Amino acid sequence: DISVPIPGFLPFPVTASVTVTATDNGCTGPPQVFSVTATPAPTGNMTLTGSANICQGQNAVFSVSISGGSAPFTIVYAIDGVNQAPITTNNNPYTLNVPMSSSGVVSLVSIANSSCTGNATGSANINVTPTPTAAISPGTTNICTGQSTDITVDFTGTGPFTFVYRINGISQPPITTPGPSYTITVTPNNPGTFNYTLFSVTSNGCAGTVSG
């Protein structure tokens, strides 16, 4: 085996000829010429371009800058140390959208092309806020004018919660509560049918879903 030293950094592919001549007992054999081509390995760096605080179901957005080598490139990243499916692209830089269902660390694992696999750097901690929900149990309550009844709103997610409810389709002022439930006391002064429905809920900047 013959080892041919290759420089650690190559800005472009380099082809060199290696001549090997064997000598034995004072006799020299015919030279053998080998052609060696060294291709620069790509390297990558990943930086967070979006927010480190996102809502459940949103993407964490990164930019991957690649140096050296030629496209197409194959990018591998990991979430909490678990490698995700490889991505192949001709774009440089590449916008990496990472779907996150829970908080975790996103890191760049490797950059490769058809010839070589190079070094990769960059990571970020992503905080994911759960999507809130708010619900009113459906039902019908009959009361007399001047009497009161309670409607309970139940929440899931991380408080505080800000919600809006409607009376007969008319939105009421927003209410903020630490949760996990809130009681609306209903005291009608006039006879009639009053339909209470939830319109929206948010927590920590994340919009959620409502029912009832």
Image (spheres, rainbow, N blue to C red):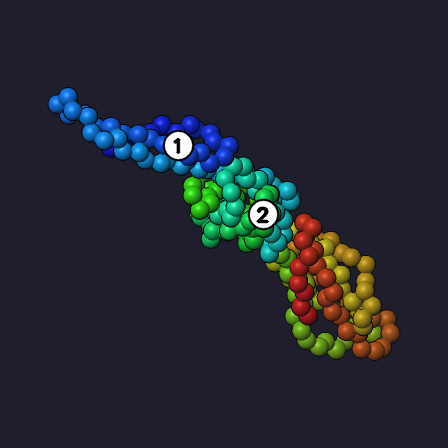
* Marks 1, 2: nearer the viewer: 1
Side of 77 relative to 158 (left or right): left
Q: Residue at x 43, y 41 (%)?
A: 117
Q: Nearer the viewer, residue 139 or 164?
A: 164
Amino acid type of disc 1?
Ala
Q: How many marks?
A: 2
Label 1: state its secondary structure.
strand
Q: Residue at x 50, y 34 (%)?
A: 12
Label 2: state its secondary structure.
loop
Amino acid type of disc 2?
Asn
Q: Tell me how far mark 1 sits from mark 2, CA to CA.
A: 30 Å
Q: Residue at x 51, y 51 (%)?
A: 88
Q: Residue at x 48, y 48 (%)?
A: 74
Check contact, mark 1 vs mark 2: CB within 8 A.
no
Q: Nearer the viewer, residue 104 or 114?
A: 114
From the image, tell me which residue sits under label 2.
91
The C terminus appears in which quarter of the rendering?
A: bottom right
Label 1 crowding class (10 Å Cα cut-off): few <14, some 14-19, many 20+?
few
Label 2 crowding class (10 Å Cα cut-off): few <14, some 14-19, many 20+?
few
In this view, 116 is above or below 5: below
From the image, tell me which residue sits under label 1.
16
In this view, 33 is above or below 126: above
